Every structure is written in structure tokens, then in C-alpha cells.
Image (tube, rainbow, N blue to C red):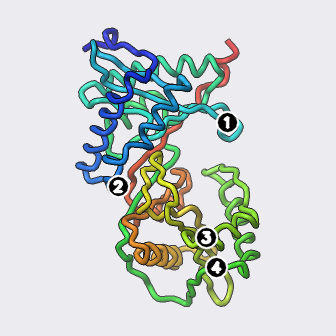
Amino acid sequence: MTFNSLKIEPIKIIHLSQVIDIWLYQYKESIASGLLIPPSWLTNVSSLRDFIRTHINEKKGVIARSGDAIVGFFLFDSFMFHDEKTAFSPIIGHTSFPFYKELVYKKIYQYLSAKWIEEGILNHLITFFSHDHLLKDLLYEFGFGLYGVDAFRSTDSISLSDGNLTILEADMNHINDLIRLEKEACHFFKQAPLFLVSSPNNLDYYKNIFENNTKTIFLAKVNNEVVGFITIGKNDEEDITLLADQNTGMITGTFIQPEHRGFGIGNCLLQRCVEWSQKRDLDRIHVDFESANLLANRFWLKHFTPVLYSVKRKVNQDIIQI
């Protein structure tokens, strides 16, 4: 097969079963490689099917064809991300058979990126499996760079060091402490090299957690002062875009004050999340973080294994002025 013989066509409903088969082939290979991902997605294909159907109906996807055989596909969403038009394909939005992968992604990205630029979409985001070194190198050649990481770990306990530290479960009496730490976290996110603008969670957010027995927040207290927190919840609804099923615990936020870092507080907070997950018979814990968050990157990669990488390309602004 050559670059010119590979055909890119809009995806249609008649392609649905073949596209699902290609994705499931990739998923089986990823499990076989040792990735800590839920095997349930091999049999529970309803979410995958619904995702593909939606994108077929919205005309947001293509297939790659070699002769009569479909050898790859690519689906995407378009939305505003940090006030910029963005096209994004999650882990369930694309794949190809290994033999065809390099040609398929080159051809598809050339085809779709031209259409995105016509619509003024300069931000391009793709999520792929961490073990897929061929695709990683290929996207790097296209000008993509690492943006975010989704990582998993088992619910095995971690080792802790002793210290003058108390870990407790938060309730409404700790709202002021939580809001204070959230504001500090937002200030931290804006600093180099992360440069991430975010807003603190509001009172309704915390009320929802405290009234929901599938979520909780653990606080770290040093000398009677709350200096850090971590939020975890059981997955209420399965999320195949994150590969998180209902046996997955989801860490959705954490922060420790700068002057209290490096003393094992993060380990203690994480261990309480592990214990919380064990009591609920969860199989794994998920966390995601920006790769430019140097502190988070260093901490999470001590305890978690990357499963998904999200990469981003920003096309030069002046292309839409031509």
C-alpha cells in the first residue's frame, strides 16, 4: 500500500461494526502489553458504539480505506478550549491496524487538519496509549507536544513515613479551609511553566461531595492547621473516554501548600484514597495531570503508571489570515 492508494472517506453508519472491531483489536493489544486498563470495555461496547454513532450523525469523522478494507478511522469533537477553537480526538476516537498505522495517520491528519484550518480551528488535541511509541513519534513529527497524562494504579497500599500529621475526612465545617486552599491552588497553576487558568470550586461543589456517599475529600493537618487536601470518588457513570469503569476510583483534585511539600504529606493523602478504594472493592485508581505541572508530574509518576498521553499542536495564527 502506498500513500496515494490509501483513501480517506467520511465515516458512515455502514462502517460501524468494522470500526468497532478495529478499536477492540487495539484495546486487546493494549491489555496484552500490560497496561492497567479495565478489561470490561472489551465486552461492554455500548458506550463505544454510542460515541461512534453520534460522530457519524454529526459528520465528524473519517475512515481510511485500502481497497475494500477499512484499516483505520478518526473521530473528533470541536469546541472552545481556553477561549480557542479546538479539535479533539479522545482515546476511543481513532486507531489503525499496526501495519498501516504510519500511512493512515499521516493521510488522515493531512486531510482533517486542512478542514480544521478552514474553520479557524488552530488547536489540535489527540489522546493515545502511552505504549504506542510509533504514534508518539509520528505526532511529534507533526509538531505535537505532550500536554496531559492519564495514569492508573492498583489499590495496593503504599509505604509511609511517620510525622506530626493528621489525615481526616472533610465535612461542611471545613469549607473555609477548602476554599482557601483552592484559591492558593489556582494561583499556583498560573505560575511558570504550567500557565493554567482555573477557577476555585464553589460552595455547591462541596455540598454535592458531602451529600454524596461515593465521593469524599481528605484533609492534611499539621499542628492543627489544614495544609492540603485530596478529592476522590467512585465512578458514578462509566467514562470510556478516560477508560474508567465503575470499578475505578477517580482522584479529581489535590493541593499541598508549598512550605509543607517534601515531608510525605502527599503519600499519606494518597494512602487514605487507597484505603477508601479498598473498602469499596475498587480495582484501580485514576488520576490526570498536565505534563507541565512539574510537581504533580514528579509525584504522580512515583505512584501511578501512565496509560494515556494527550498531545497538543497549536498552528500558527497567521495561516488563517492568508
Q: Nearer the viewer, mark 3 or mark 1?
A: 3
**Residue 171, quarter of picture:** bottom right
The first of marks 2 and 4 along the sequence is 2
**Residue 70, quarter of picture:** top left
Up the image or down, 268 lies above or below 143; here it is below
Q: CA distance from mark 3 to mark 2?
A: 24 Å
The first of marks 2 and 1 along the sequence is 2
Residue type at mark 2 is: Pro
**Residue 220, quarter of picture:** bottom right
**Which structural element holds mark 2?**
loop
Q: CA distance from mark 2 to mark 4?
A: 30 Å
**Which structural element holds mark 1?**
strand
Name the spot of residue 2 as percent of width and height, x first. Answer: 28, 12
**Which structural element holds mark 4?**
loop
What residue is shown with label 3? 212
Q: Point out which mark residue 125 bears.
A: none
Q: CA distance from mark 3 to mark 1?
A: 30 Å
Q: Residues within 10 Å of mark 4 (few under 14, many from 20)?
A: many
Q: CA distance from mark 1 to mark 4?
A: 34 Å
Residue type at mark 4 is: Ala
Residue type at mark 1 is: Met
- At x 28% / y 30%, what residue is drawn? 97
What residue is shown with label 2? 38
